[in-house]
Structure formats: structure tokens, C-alpha cells
């Protein structure tokens, strides 16, 4: 039986993709809220929804809710939609292909080196005035920063592990499944030019986070993650890079909380000198990626199905 979405045009599939994501995310948030309330016996469940934590355990409940919602919204949607498009999800999302060790090492080092450049982009973004009609974006980001600070206000290893899973690991897997494995994969299979597909997916990825002051940095980061997916043909490479980026933020916050470093890296300012060095080394890494790249052939879904049928016969 041919998968139902296989013959749909690309534009319609993308529309259905985001519609399914919104539906799944809504359902999973409801389930996650119910589970968190029962597990932590919250007196006021609204604090988890508003981010105004009046109970210490509400932060843990919020972490649990975030983890369940991300897994359900991103991972479940990607897997379900892939099956509806091609009949399976492992090859469709390219999670059955693994990158070489040198690619993984290079991707991790690239993210570490790029931190100074990324922070410089944030500083530039902060200098761009936000129109008054969009002031709500600034207010929303400040609110999300307060929630993030509440989640990251820990000093014990147990919370370091829990926050790393929820803030670093689950988003790295979930967002890469959806934005790179599914969305970017469909654009590439739809014969959209790789550069256009990679950058446009990076823009959508950045906008989905609703963080105006980080918009430029997240577009660059999202585009780089898409580039890693394209040059390796494996979803695990951008997952590794994405996890590294998120985990660095968690780890630096932990070091600050326990007094190992004197300055919160979230508020640190990057000098032009470090930015230039960071960008230069990052450019060398991009050169190496291009030299060693082994991109997969992103073929149309119907064409891929035909190839599989021919192989079987």
C-alpha cells in the first residue's frame, strides 16, 4: 500500500507537517501537564503554565513537562509524518546512517569555537531596535529568560543531569528530527537548491524559538546544523552539534552557580579580537567539512520508492 502523503505536492506536505506538529504539541502539553501535576502533587498548576514558580517542586514539574512536550511534539511528529510520506522513518530521516568519528569531532569542535562568534551576533542583534508593534517579542523573551534562570538555578549533580537531558539532549534530538530530518529533508528531496533549503530551514528554526535578540545567532546556528546534515547525510551529526551547543550553556551556568567561574557566560561580552579568531578557525573547519563531505542523494519520495521497487524485482 502506497503511503497516503507520498503523492502530495511539497507545499501541501509542509503545511500538513506544521499542522500535525501543532496538534501533537497541544496534545502532548496537556498530557505532560497532567503527568507533572500528579507526580509532583502541585497545589497550583497555573505556575507551571505561566512560569511563575511559587513552589520549589514546580521547577522540576516544568522540566518534566518540557521534556515530554518536546519528545511528543518534535520526535513523534517527525516519525509519524515520515511514515505517512514514505512508509518508514529510519531511512527517511536518515537516522540509520552514522557519521564518521572525525566528522563528529569536527562538528563538536566547530560548535565550541563558534561560541564567541555566536555571542558577537547576539550583541549585534541587541543593537537593532525592535518596532513598537513587536515589543511583545521582547517581553516574551525576557519572560522566557526568567524561566530559564529558574530552571538553571541549581548546584547539585542530580539537577545538572536532569537539566542537561531536558535543555540539551531532548531538544537536540527532537528539533533535529523535525527541522533537519523532516523539513530540510523534504525540501532537499523536493529539489529545492541546497543553499536555499538550508538557510530557509535555519530561518524557520530561529523564528520558532521566538527569541528576537538571538535571531541572527540562531539563523546562523540553524543553517550550520542544516549544512552538517547535508554534507554528512546523517541526522546524528547535527544532533551531536546541537547537543554540544546546548550543553555548553548548561555546563557554564553550573560552573557559575558553584563558583568555579566568576562571570555568568550568558551575560558575557565577546571582544572583536576573539570573534575574528573564532570566525577564522570556524572557516577552516568549514573547509575541512567541504573537503571530507559525503552528502547523501536526496531524491524525491516517489523516485526513492521506484528505486526500492526496482531493487526488489
Image (tube, rainbow, N blue to C red):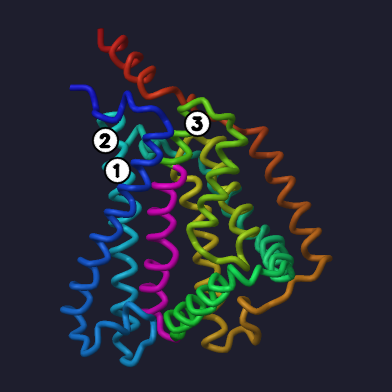
Lower sequence index among marks 1 and 3: 1
Asked if 168 appears above or below 290 in the picture, the reply is below
Chief secondary structure of the magenta span? helix
Instruction: Judge from the rendering whether residue 209 lies leftward or rightward of residue 18; answer left or right.
Output: right
Number of the label disc, if any, that sits on residue 188: 3
Q: Residues within 10 Å of mark 2 (few under 14, many from 20)?
A: some
Lower sequence index among marks 3 and 2: 2
Residue 183 place in picture, x, y as percent: 44, 41
For image coordinates 61% across by 76% down, the residue present is 266
In reply to whether residue 177 is colored magenta, the answer given is yes
Disc 1, SS? helix
Instruction: Judge from the rendering whether residue 93 lies leftward or rightward of residue 190; answer left or right.
Output: left
For image coordinates 71% across by 69% down, the residue present is 129
Residue 211 place in picture, x, y as percent: 55, 66
* Nearest to the observer: residue 58 or residue 46: 46
Asked where in the image residue 56 lies, by quadrant, the reply is bottom left
Number of the label disc, if any, that sits on residue 83: 2
Q: CA distance from mark 2 to mark 1?
A: 6 Å
Q: Are marks 2 and 1 in contact (CB under 8 Å)?
A: yes
Can you identify the residue that label 1 sits on? 79
For image coordinates 42% across by 53% down, the residue present is 175
For image coordinates 38% across by 41% down, the residue present is 15
Residue 275 place in picture, x, y as percent: 77, 62
Give, as a single range, the part of the protein colored magenta.
155-180
Amino acid at each position: 500500500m502506497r503511503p497516503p502523503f507520498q503523492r502530495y505536492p511539497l507545499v501541501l506536505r509542509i503545511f500538513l507537517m506544521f499542522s500535525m506538529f501543532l496538534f501533537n504539541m497541544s496534545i502532548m502539553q496537556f498530557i505532560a501537564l497532567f503527568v507533572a501535576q500528579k507526580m509532583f502533587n502541585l497545589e497550583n498548576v497555573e505556575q507551571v503554565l505561566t512560569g511563575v514558580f511559587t513552589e520549589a517542586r514546580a521547577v522540576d514539574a516544568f522540566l518534566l513537562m518540557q521534556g515530554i512536550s518536546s519528545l511528543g511534539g518534535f520526535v513523534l511528529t517527525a516519525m509519524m509524518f515520515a511514515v505517512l510520506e514514505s512508509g518508514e522513518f529510519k531511512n527517511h530521516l536518515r537516522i540509520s546512517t552514522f557519521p564518521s568519528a572525525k566528522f563528529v569531532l569536527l562538528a563538536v569542535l566547530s560548535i565550541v569555537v563558534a561560541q564567541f562568534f555566536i555571542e558577537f551576533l547576539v550583541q549585534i542583534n541587541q543593537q537593532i531596535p525592535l518596532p513598537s508593534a513587536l515589543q511583545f517579542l521582547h517581553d516574551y523573551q525576557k519572560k522566557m529568560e526568567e524561566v530559564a534562570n529558574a530552571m538553571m538555578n541549581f548546584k547539585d549533580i542530580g539537577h545538572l543531569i536532569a537539566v542537561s537531558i531536558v535543555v540539551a539532549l531532548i531538544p537536540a534530538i527532537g528539533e533535529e528530527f523535525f527541522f533537519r530530518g523532516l523539513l530540510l529533508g523534504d525540501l532537499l528531496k523536493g529539489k529545492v537548491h541546497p543553499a536555499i533549503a538550508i538557510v530557509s530551514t535555519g530561518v524557520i528554526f530561529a523564528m520558532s524559538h521566538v527569541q528576537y535578540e538571538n535571531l541572527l545567532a540562531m539563523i546562523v546556528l540553524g543553517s550550520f546544523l542544516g549544512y552538517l546534515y547535508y554534507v554528512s547525510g546523517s541526522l546524528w551529526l547535527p544532533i551531536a552539534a546541537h547537543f554540544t551547543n546546548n550543553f555548553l550553556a548548561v555546563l557554564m551556568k553550573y560552573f557559575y552557580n558553584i563558583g568555579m567561574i566568576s562571570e555568568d557566560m550568558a551575560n558575557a561580552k565577546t571582544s572583536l579580537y576573539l570573534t575574528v579568531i573564532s570566525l577564522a578557525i570556524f572557516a577552516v573547519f568549514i573547509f575541512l567539512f567541504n573537503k571530507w563531505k559525503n552528502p547523501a542523494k536526496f531524491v524525491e519520495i516517489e523516485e526513492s520508492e521506484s528505486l526500492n521497487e526496482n531493487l526488489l524485482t
